[in-house]
Amino acid sequence: MHTDLVVTISGPDRTGLVDQFASRIRAHGGNWEESRLMRLAGWFCGMLLVRVPVEQAEALETALRAVSADTVVTIGHGESDVRELNVVHLSVTCADRNGIVHDMSRTLVAQGANIEELHSDVIRAPMSGEPLFRATIRVSVPVEVGTYGILDALEALQPDLLVEVL
């Protein structure tokens, strides 16, 4: 019997940090199933989904939390969503402004959608140099809502907002 652990990591970045987590997971019979890892302004941030034998879960949690005194590790136990959902991958581009992520998240919630993954940045427009917000978003949408309802609601946020299904 196995259990799923959702592990979040945050702390100063340094060489070998991922290896320290990976070696502890392997030593406890765990399987590193999914992850999102990145370096932001000198900090390492990440989330992992680890499947581990139930009898090893507590020991693995202790081992992961002991990686470093300056690294914060939180661990939760995974759960399955029983609703019937469609997963939609979107690309969003528009003029940058304060509050765009809030407006998009509020709009998606109003449609019953859930943001599963969001990657965003601000770049300079090629010709004008004006700041452009861009994001790729993975959204789970209840079957009864549909993709077009999501697209229409997001595009209504501002005139230059371009949404594409990937």
Image: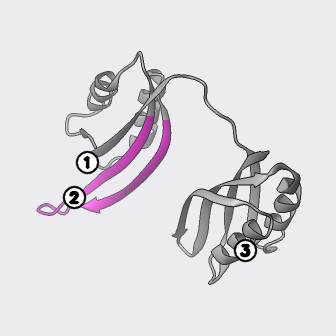
Q: At which x and y percent is residue 49? A: 64, 53
> Helix, strand or loop at disc 3?
helix
Q: Amino acid at mark 2?
A: Glu
140 over 4 or under it: above or below: above
Q: At which x and y percent is residue 25? A: 74, 66
Q: At which x and y percent is residue 110? A: 46, 22
Quadrant containing the C terminus in the rendered view = top left
Residue 70 sits inside the magenta stretch: no
Whole-number angstrom distance, CA of label 2 to CA of label 3 = 45 Å
> Helix, strand or loop at disc 1?
strand
User: Residue drawn 88% across and 52% down?
Assistant: 55
Question: Could you tell me if the residues under marks 2 and 1 are in contact, i.e. CB atoms within 8 Å?
Answer: yes
17 over 57 or under it: above or below: below
The region drawn magenta spans: 115-139
Q: Which mark is residue 130?
A: 2
Q: Which sits earlier in the primary sequence, circle 3 or circle 1?
A: 3
> Helix, strand or loop at disc 2?
loop
In this view, the residue in front, 116 or 57, is 57
Question: How many C-alpha atoms fall within 10 Å of the one at disc 2: few (<14), some, or many (≥20)?
Answer: few
From the image, tell me which residue sits under label 1.
Answer: 95
The number of numbered badges drawn on the structure is 3
Give left or right: position of 114 versus 72: left
User: Residue drawn 32% across and 21% down?
Assistant: 149
From the image, tell me which residue sits under label 3.
Answer: 23
